[in-house]
Each structure stands twice: as structure tokens, then as C-alpha cells.
Amino acid sequence: METILVTGPTGYIGGRLVPRLLSGGRRVRCLARHPERLAGRPWAGSVEIFKGDVYKDEGLAGALAGADAAYYLVHSMADVPGFADMEAVSAANFARAAAAAGCKRIIYLGGAGSDRSTLSPHLASRHRVGEILRSTGVPVTEFRAGMIVGSGSVSFEMIRYLVERLPVIPACSCLDSHSQPLAVRDALMYLAGCLDKPATANRVIEIGGSTCHRYRDLLKIYADIRGLRRWFVDLHHWNMGFCSAMIGLITPIPRVFAKPLMESLRCEVTCDTAAAAELFPEIRPLDYATAVKYALVRLSENAVETSWTAAYTPSYARAYSFEDREGMISHAHVLEVGAPAAAVYRVFTGLGGRRGWLYGQWLWYLKALQDRLVGGIGMRRGRRHPDVIHQGEALDSWRVERVIENRLLLLRAEMRLPGKGWLQFEAVPRGEAASTLRLTAYFEPHGLFGSLYWYALYPAHVLVFRGLALAIRRRAEAPFN
């Protein structure tokens, strides 16, 4: 049985490739800087996990020892100073370690674009990494792909959010460039399938979908599939900095990621897929429209296997987090509490009604008044019992959607909102006399107005929910001080 090493297993492609290699009967190893981020993956117990860092040259020898082939899926998505040098150092370290370990093959997923054209800094770095990996004599299969289309991919999410949120889309000149988007399922088939094809060694193989489009047409096709009417306004003089800043405001993609994506739009990234068709006759790449439909189905089923956001620190590990992704906005406050989880649970399940909301009560009344002025229910319903709460009951302007005894309370907003809202309280035990309180607000906006509504109230939400979390902690700890 072949032993295969996958670097970047916490990333978008790596996280999807590992289970496909396992299903193909391979023995799989993973090299990750943060192995704890693999906890909870369905396949985590079926692989060997090594802690290491290709840039620092840590853990490479052990992970590569005895490996028959290795996937190099380490990329810098962000526009940070010196990223190209960091990628070059990382690739050189990996290539030397692979040669020293006797690894028979390196498989690398790089970026499309002709070497003769003017490439963006990030695409040029991708090509340079391929050259460095080949420098030590280990056979390398380099796949060059353009935009990857799939649920959770950064390129697809950028298109989705722009079209969903903007009825009028500003179109800069870079949207006239062409792209050949590749469905993520096809990319994975190429990556996994090349292990059984010795002829793919020492080859640079361009892979792309079956259709080629201008970037503005990618937006139009998405809008047509979703049944949305969108208009484009040509603003050819907008600079790249302004466009990336706009994307950072409208979409969940930070500016540090948006800028390299926008720079890459200037490049013609069509592919010569003749070699791919010859070497992989069994793969018939999807067209862009079909790839979009598949991605939307995955989103509707809440079956997103991996997401570009995996590069972030998990929100449960931070005292405060804000996320806007996959159509859902959330922000959470996490506090350590010197009281058992059951005590914390009793406090947050006793909120509302005559007892009130413990913090900023006048703000809750103000929101209820605003809701009544637009025909909503306000806070007129109160609660059935001051201490006991059941699933399905009304609680002021909320509906109890889920209750887990001594652990969790999920409330769904029934006030009039430009979207759907939830408020979740969770008490996680930390021994007999301590726990962690996690208060998370969720909002699924309807269109651009829904997003503007939430962001306009963002400061008030931070104030109220942070204050509420602190008040719950004080009330829970009071009997134990």
C-alpha cells in the first residue's frame, strides 16, 4: 500500500483530497502547522498527523520518511510583505527534504496563466514554486488551474456575495479578462488520479473547465442561475486598491485576500487542456454554469466540505469573533465562568419576561418599540414561566427553537427583520466548578438591505451582547463567590 503525504490538510483543497485518497486505498499522512484544527474531521482517525512547518523546515524529515508521493498544497493567499520569498523558501525546504527522504513523486497544484504573459505577483509566485520543486530532481507533476468553483472556495464566494448583495455591480476593466473556471470536483479527480498515471510525472499540466468566459460573464451567469436581475456600470478608471477595499466591505473576504484575487483578474488565465485530455480521458470537466449549480446545492444542503475560511483561527478559540460567510453573519462572545455549566444555564434560560435581559434593558425596549411601529409583535408576549422553558415556547419577541438541558438555548427572532436572526447561549463544562459561556448572534440577511441593516447596528450589537454575556457571568458566579 502506498504511503502518501498531504501538506496543507487544513486548507480548502487538502481537506477534500485526503478522504478521496483514503477511499482509493492509500495510506495517508498529513503535515500541518496546527494539527488541532484537524480534530473533528471524519477522517482524522484514519491518517497519521505530523506537526510541522515547511517555511521553518520543521517536521519535514519525519513526515516524508517512507512516503511514496507527496502533495504540496501550501500557498499564501494573503497580500503580505515578502510573501513570494516566503513561498520560495518553503518550496526549497520541501524539495530538499523530499529528495533526502527518497520520495518518488511531488504533486503540486499551482496557478494558470502563460509564462509569456504578464502575471500578477501571486500567479508568478505559483510558477516559481513549481520550478523550485523541480530543482532537486524529484519527479514533479505540476497542475496549473485557474479559478476553482465550489462551495466554500474563495473565488466562488466572492462572486456569490457580489451578485447576491449588489443590484448594480461596478465593473472595472479587469472584468473583461477571460477565465476558464474549474469545478472543485474535477480538480480533485485530476489530483487523486495522477497517482495511477506514471506518464504524468515530470509534466506541467494545465487544467480548466469546459467553458471559457469573461469575468463579468461569470457574474451574469450566476445571477441568471439565481434568478436575479443585475446591472453593470462600467467604471474603468477605478484602481485596484479601491476595488479590493470595496470587496472587503461587501463580501466576507478580507482586503488582504481580495487584493491578490483582483490583481489576478487582469491576467488571461485560459488553459491549453490538450495534455490533460490525453492523460485523463476519463475526466470530462464541467462547464461553469453546472459547477455553480453544484456549489449552490451543497450550500442549500449545509454540506460544505471545506471552506477558504479554514485559514482563520477557529472562532471558539477567541474571546470575540465576527464572521460573514456562506450567507450567514455571526459574532460570538466567549467568557470563562467560575461556576458550573448548570448554574450558567439557569441564568440564561431565565432571561426575558418580568426578569428582563440583565443588561441594557432600555435598548431591548427601544428595539421592541421599533418593531411594533412597523407592525411587529414587540415584547408583548413575555414568557410562560419565570424559570422553566420548553422548546417551541414564545419568549418576548423570540421563539425557543432548541433546548439542551444544562447546556444550550437557541432563540429565533420573530420580530420584523430584513432577514432571519438567532441568538444562542451555550454553557460548556470545565470541571465541576467552572465552565465556558459562549453567546453567539446569527443573522441571515435578505439582499443588500439586510446586510446594511446588520452592519449599521453592529456597534449596538457588540455593546448589548458583550454586556449581556458579562451580566450572565456575574449572576452565575454570585452564589459561588
Image (cartoon, rainbow, N blue to C red):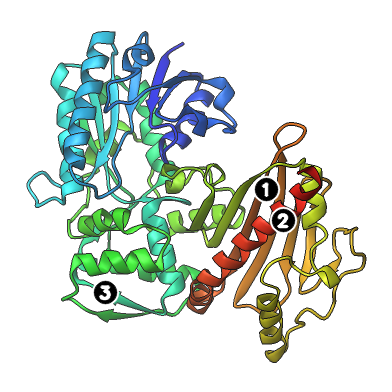
Do the numbered discs 2 and 3 sit on residues whose CB atoms are within 8 Å?
A: no
Of callouts 2 and 3, the N-terminal one: 3
252 shown above or below 136: below
Viewer-closest of 290 and 380: 380
Of callouts 1 and 2, the N-terminal one: 1
Q: CA distance from mark 2 to mark 3?
A: 48 Å
Residue depicted at x 18% and y 60%: 266
Residue depicted at x 39% and y 21%: 5
Q: Is residue 57 left or right of residue 384?
A: left
- Could you say where residue 306 lies in the image, as x and y percent from the top left? 49, 43
- Could you say where residue 236 lies in the image, as x and y percent from the top left? 18, 76
Q: What residue is shown with label 3? A: 171
Q: Nearer the viewer, mark 2 or mark 3?
A: 2
| Mark drawn on residue 437 | 1
Q: What residue is shown with label 2? A: 472
Query: Element under label 1?
Result: strand
- What type is the residue that disc 2 sits on? Ile
- What type is the residue that disc 1 sits on? Leu
How many neighbours does mark 2 have within 10 angstroms: few (below 14), some (14-19), or many (20 or more)? many
Query: Element under label 2?
Result: helix
